[in-house]
Image: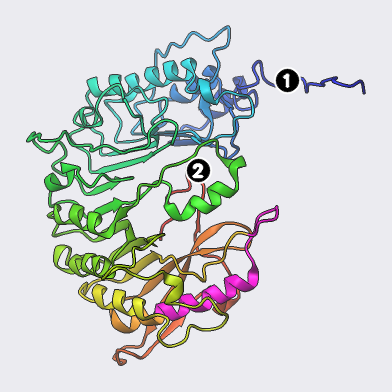
Amino acid sequence: MAAGTRYWIPLEYAQNPFVCGVIGGPSLGQALRHMPTLRSISVLTRERAVHGLSWTTVKTILSLPQIQEVSITGLLLCPSKLPHDDYRLDSWAPLTSFHYEVFSNRIDGMKTRQNYPFPSEEEVLLLVLSRIHTSLEKLVLSTEPAPLLAMSQWTWPRLRELRLRGERRSLPPVPYMTLLSAMPNLRTLILEFTLVSEECTHAGPLWPPGSHMPFPWPDLTHLSVANPNPSDELYRYLPPSVRVLSLCCRPHKSEKAWISTLLIYTVHVYEYPVLTSAEMLGILENCHLPHLTRLEIEYEVREREGELDLLRRLGSMFPQLTWLQIHRYRAATPSGGPGDIPPLASQMQAGAGLASAGELDFIDDIAQALSHLPRLHTICAHLDLPQQPKIQDNYPFYYNRAKIDEYTKTLRDVTHCLARTIPSLETLYFWRPRRTGHIEWAPFEVVRADGAAKDDFEIRCPEDVRTYGGPQYPVIPMPDLYGVDP
């Protein structure tokens, strides 16, 4: 082989390296037309590559009159325009659900990152949405190629659920509230925007400051806002119909170590604007949600009483709460002044075996604070414990099995502390690494006999049956895998 010689694999199925030549062709349309009861089509890949569907394939799918739901995840809509593409859609199915989500962290192997989104993709997505917006009841969309300006000018009479995922734009073509106000019948609103350092480092408020406009979604029941702004006036206008509220970073700060270690999985450097416990309390105090049953929060602890005040107030603010997810982090450099918390490592020793008396005192404090929630039956928690195993430095990256076992023993102790003080608890899920380099929600079940005393219960966890399987949680933003919370 001569020096500098390059050999290219010929394209056997595709006319373009970015367009899939396998999914499509006359055989696909013929097969689908022979499925008259087919209602849903899902096309999914988890390969982080610039690859997508041809216009012929997209047109074939959307033209089937019996189809109600279409989901395209990981694959792009028409990343390149082929010579015969006309981008006309004369007939289309009245879809009720459309899911188009691409990898915002795809590998930049072909130097396409700086050119994304692609003009052909934007043109096709605009065309498709312009045809189906009046029939849609559910829409999941990546923000990067989304035609936000056009969407704000359309009517969405049947839309009940909207999920926007991807990079938050520092200067969107239209304010997000202007776009969302065009969707008055929303019940579920999920805004999972990431902050990419080179693009947008700060999440501004969604609600126009000082505005007294009517709240646009009077029947809203589920709201999720990634990287919430503590000065956002949106929360003071939330209707009492809201039952689910999520205010976390996207990605979670607890994922930062993994993302930073495996840079091959992402071309981004993310921002993690974690609020303090006092700032989180300020947001929640602006909410008047007497029927809230599920809450997800992420915060940094700078003062012991600040965190405990936040957790105590949950009982009076949200008395119907049954499900709570907490991602908490100790301040990296506590000032040492009165009321500050010393580093967690000084409170708990990361030795092997069960935690000794006194090491879990701060967990007892948390349990006492949460005991004011009489209906609380499920807790999911990342507690920032020093025993949490660290990723091994050598490649391939993995976690030490012995350290995971030690950590699991500590989590069992934490479960005992919480279950002893909160008699309504039934299940706890803890953020725990797996040896293969993933993160899971490890389940711990609290088993109480009928009529048993408060302290009479049993803790069951995966190790009891020699398995290590809770629901796997993605530690890198990946489409279609975020709905795995218990």
Answer above or below: position of 38 versus 64.
below
For badge 1, the amino acid type reads Leu
Which mark is first along the chain, 2 or 1? Answer: 1
Q: Quadrant of the C terminus?
A: bottom left
Foreground residue among 254 and 381: 254
Quadrant position of residue 373: bottom left
Question: Does 397 appear in magenta?
Answer: yes
Residue under the point 33% across and 33% down = 96
Identify the residue at horizontal 60%, vertical 24% (top origin).
Answer: 111
**Amino acid type, residue under disc 2 in the picture:** Met
Mark 1 → mark 2, Cα distance in angstroms = 28 Å
* Quarter where residue 163 is shown: top left
| Residue 358, quarter of picture | bottom left
Judging by the rendered image, the residue that carries numbered circle 1 is 11
Q: Is residue 220 above or below residue 334?
A: above
Q: Which residue is mark 2?
A: 478
Q: Is residue 459 left or right of residue 85?
A: left
Above or below for 97 versus 444: above
Q: Is residue 17 above or below residue 191?
A: above
| Magenta extent | 392-415
Local crowd at mark 1 within 10 Å, few (<14), some, or many (≥20)?
Answer: few
Helix, strand or loop for disc 2 = loop
The residue lying toward the viewer, choosing from 139 and 232, is: 232
Residue 474 appears in the rendering: no
Where residue 457 appears, as percent x and y from the top left, is 38, 87
Residue 3 percent coordinates (x, y): 89, 22
Q: Nearer the viewer, residue 357 or 457?
A: 357
